[in-house]
Structures are given as structure tokens and as C-alpha cells.
Image (cartoon, rainbow, N blue to C red):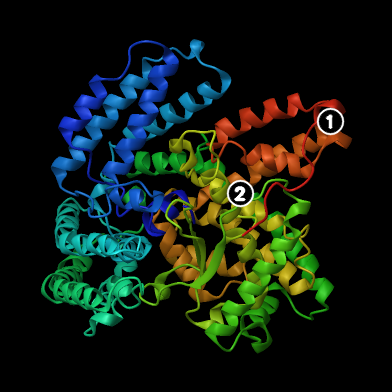
Amino acid sequence: MSLIRKVLLTSLGLVTSLNVSAMDQKAFRKAFKSLPETSATERLTALQDLRYRWIMESYPSRATYEGYPDQNHRWVDNSLKAIERRQQQTRLLLGATRNIDQVDLTAEQQLDYQLLYQDLLGSVKGFQFPEHLQPVTHMSGVQRNVPAVLNSMPKRTVADYEMIIRRLERLPILIEQTEGLMRRGLRKQVTPPQITLRDLPRQIRALVPPVPEQSPLLNAFNNMPKAIPAAMQQSLQQRAHATYSKLLVPAWQNMAEFIEREYTPGAQVDTALTSRPDGLRWYAHKVEESTTTDLSPEEIHRIGLAEVRRIRGEMDKIIQKTGFQGDFKEFTGFLRTDPRFYHNSRDALLRDYRDIAKRIDAELPVLFSTLPRLPYGVKPIPSYSEQSQTTAYYQPGSVDTGRAGIFFANTYNLQSRPKWEMEALTVHEAMPGHHLQIALAQEQSDIHPLRRMALYTAFVEGWGLYSESLGYDLGLYKNPYSEFGALTYDMWRAVRLVVDTGMHQLGWSREQAIDYFMENSAKPLHDVTVEIDRYLVWPGQALAYKLGQLKIKELRAKAEENLDSNFDIRRFHDALLGAGALPLNILEARMHSWIESQGSASAYADSPSAPQTSAG
């Protein structure tokens, strides 16, 4: 999110909002009261089951992505009453978890307990901050997530299309509730920074063009399955178009006008989260939530400065290798402007990404003995969001719903999409990055579904960034420009540590952050501006990438040192990914135990050496 827990839960379409409708109160009370009072094992399993059901039935959009039944007709309930009910239910679940005696649990059950408890505790800590009062940003919210959810729904039968129509009919309620939260946030001065809202009305209006067939909301009705009779197809299309014209167009247009006339003019001009009420503590919570560490913003800032210096030294060596006559600024200017580094069509850009992906797939068994069965594809970021979207993102697939994972690449403004960044971006978003890690977690049948869908940003994005370094092992980065591109991406994440903490903790201006980014990176100004605005509306989220990568590299170095000739990179990766996504504090303890268990050559005697499955 997953861009990956925040990215995948709010902007990559996994849920419509962080504040979703709770289970029916009566159903929750009945399930909660029926929790067993017998063994710790039974109580833990029952709590996991209830938590999973609660998420699926409270987050209907997430249920769609997971293939959980009977939720595809619903949206979230964003009323204040529902938000308060969800918070109370979460507190009850946390209290019940605290009553479990861990002594009676096995090692794996203790891991289940730690994850459940830490997840619930983090949620409850977050309730003290009014994040629900800014449900929409240029990076996330109903305008971004609704089309993604609709396009991810099953589209095979008449019943599937009936569910889509029912969701369309209920959409104005969601829009109205979202606007209500925004109005409340406006009164309390809890809004995204004003500068980041400039593109929001355009994003919304792009959903409701004059011709219904051109709306991203109705994509499902443009190419319906031949198994549905033509007369029925026409009837379903007519109903969808009528709902669109009578209900959806007015609702979206009203929201766009509200944002233009009231929300943006009244939004916070100050860009730092710390300028909001109780902002220092709020930012500290966001940092802890995203990184799953106890590092302070100041400590993270210093780590970022050190990493920038280190990577800058490596970049200078590459410049010398190319024979370029000029300094760093001149070289990055050359990379940003020379036509040889850019495609001349969107189709050519996508073809190149797909070619890189196929070349990577063939080399993966060198590094992994277990590969996912689920395939993945490469698609362009939808036009309605491409202008203000980042360079790329990954959307998980699902075997249960028959949906492949998707690496979405931005094809907007080709002069900001250099060829030298494409290999690093592909290993991060697709294989062996997000698709491999997330799909493997989804396919693990021996862990609870609650863990299979976990998306801890520091782990997921840390793995994605670590995967970029595996590009060398996969035969990528063979010319100095693509090697510089890999370093540019590493620098990008190091710079994040500096500018995110700089803007939200140390008083940096938006312009100061942009200048620092440009001085230390070859990324084009458009990309840099989009990135800085992302950090403004998702405080702390971008810190997780580099900190996660550094932790994984630290664990690998420890394994290589301790195991020496017994170290096997494939078994290390299997162990790292084998429990699904984990908070960094839990990952570290788990991997230290694994290293100790692998301390002799005999530990490897019965381990498999051949790939178990092939990549999609």
C-alpha cells in the first residue's frame, strides 16, 4: 500500500476510505458475546475470525478485492455515528485480545497474537486524531477509489451486473457522507494543504463526461460477456445509464463545485501536519504507524542525510564511468532532456515495460525457490488520475475472484518518463517486488486470512525497494544510465526521509523540499512536484520505504556473516517472505531466530532446491 499499506488501502483501490461502515451492531454484539472462554488457542482463533469478518463486512470494497461474499452491492457508511461505532468495536476487540494468556500459545500462534494485538492497538491509538475529517485528497478518496472498485467487481453473469448497478445506485449516499466529513473538517481546519487541492475538481469531473460510455464508472457495461443475451445486455446498460444521468452526474458535479467554491478557498494554507491541532503528536503517530519502529522524526532525518551522502558518492562514480564532461547538475540535466532517453508514444513505453517484465521472470529462480502462481500484467494508469498520480503503482490480484495483479505505469507526459528508470521501477512494482511478495502472501494456505491480506507499509515497500537492488542479480542495469537510474530510485527514497521530516517536523517549506529533491536526483520537476505533494497529504507514509529496505539489508548482512558458506539467498528470501507481511520489529525478531536455526550445514540437507511454481 502498497505504494502499499496507505498506498494500497486508500489510493490503490483496496478500500473506499480508512473510515468504513461497521458490521451491524446487533451482529457484532452477538459474535463478540459468543467468543469462547475456554482455551487461549480457541479464543485467539475466534478473535481472528471475528476481526476478519469485521473488516470484510465493514469494508465492503476490501471484501470485493478479497472475494468475500455478499458485499458487492454495498459502499461504506461514512456517517459520524458509524465511525464512532467502529471505534468502539475496535476497542472491544483490543480488550478481548489483552485477556488471552500467551503462555499457552505455540510459537506460530504467538505470532498471530502479536500481529492481531499490534494491529488493534495501532488503530485505537489513531482514534485520537481526526483523520476521518479529511477523507479526500488528490491522492486518495472516493474519486480515486470508486472507479477502481467498480472495475474490480466480477463481470460474468447477470447477477454480477445487478450488483454493479446496486452499487451505482447507492453511490450518491457515499458522496454525500464524504462531503459531510469534509465540511466538518473545514470547520475544524482539518484539511489537506490548499496547494494540493488544485487538481481535485478535474479528477472528479473526469468521472462524469457527457457521454456515459466514456465514464470510468461504467466501463463494465461497454464490453459485456457474450454469455449474457443481447436483450438483457441492453436492459442492464439502459439502467446503468439512467442511474448515471439522474443520480451520479449531479452528485459528482455538486462535489466538484463544493471543492472549488468552499473547500479549497477555506483549506489550510500551511503545509505541515504539525500546523494542525495537536500536529506534533499526530505526525509522531503517523511515523510510528508507517515505519513500525520507535525512531523519532529527527533520527529519521539524520538517517536520510547520511543515505543521501552515500548514494550521491555512488552516483558521482557512475558519472565518471560514462565519460560525461560536467558536474552532477549538468549530468542530471542531460538525463532529463536528451531525447534518446524518452519514448515517443505511450504504447512504446508500455511495450518496453512489458519486455522488461518478461526478461525478469526468466531469471527469478536464481533468487527464489518459491514463486507465486498468480499472473500479473502491465497497464497504463487511468487517464482521469494520471496527471496527479505518481510514476507507478501496483494493484493486487486475487485467485478467488479471477483477477491478475496489475503494475500500473504512468504514461502521462512522456518527457517525464525516462527509459533509465524503467528497470528499477519494474522490479519494484512487479517482480520480484510487490507482485511476488503480495501474491505469495495471498497464496499461503497455512496462515489465517487476516494475515494473508496484511499490508504493513514498511515491509511491503521496504521489500519493493530492496528488490530494486536485486536487479543486478537479475541481469539488469547493464549500461551506466540504467545503473544511474537504479541509484536515482534509491536516492529518491533516501531524499524522502529528509524532506518528509523536514516539512512536517523541522519547518521546511514546500519549495525548499522541491529544491532539495531536484539538487540530489535526476527525476524530472513534474515527478518531484507530484512526490512532494504526496508527502504533504500522506505524512510519514513515504518514510517506510527506505527504513524497510535498510532493515531487510541489515538482516541479510547478518545472515551472510553468521551463516558464511551456509548462506543461501533463496532460502533467505523464502524465510523473509514466508510469514506474509510483518511489522519491522516482529520481522527482526523472527529473522534472528531463523538465522540461529540455520547455523549448520545440516540445516540445509533436506531443503528443496528447485522452484516449486513458475511466475505468472
Q: Is residue 302 visible?
A: no
Query: Is residue 248 placed above or below 11 in the rendered structure?
Result: below
Quarter of the image that includes the C terminus:
bottom right
Residue at left offset 36%, top offset 14% = 99
Tag 1 residue: 605
Residue 217 pos. (x, y %):
28, 71
Relative vertical location of residue 220 with respect to residue 188 in this rendering, above or below: below
Q: Can you give x and y, in whole percent of width and height, for residue 200 in the image?
A: 29, 70
Instruction: Give, as a three-letter code, the residue at label 1.
Output: Ala
Which residue is at 29% across, 61% downward? 160
Q: Earlier in the sequence, mark 1 or mark 2?
A: 2
* Residue labelled with disc 2: 463
Q: How dense is the environment of label 2, judged by Cα within 10 Å: few (below 14), some, or many (20 and up)? A: many
Q: Secondary structure at mark 1?
A: loop
> Which of the 4 quarters of the picture holds residue 606?
top right
Residue 394 in the image, given as x and y percentages of width and height: 50, 60
Disc 1 and disc 2: Cα gap in Å? 28 Å
Front one among 310 and 253? 253
How many discs appear? 2
Horizontal relation, residue 342 to residue 560: left or right: left
- The location of residue 183, given as percent across then percent down, is 15, 57
Identify whether 549 is placed above or below 519.
above
Kindly tell me whether residue 130 is visible in this rendering. Answer: yes
Q: Amino acid at mark 2?
A: Trp
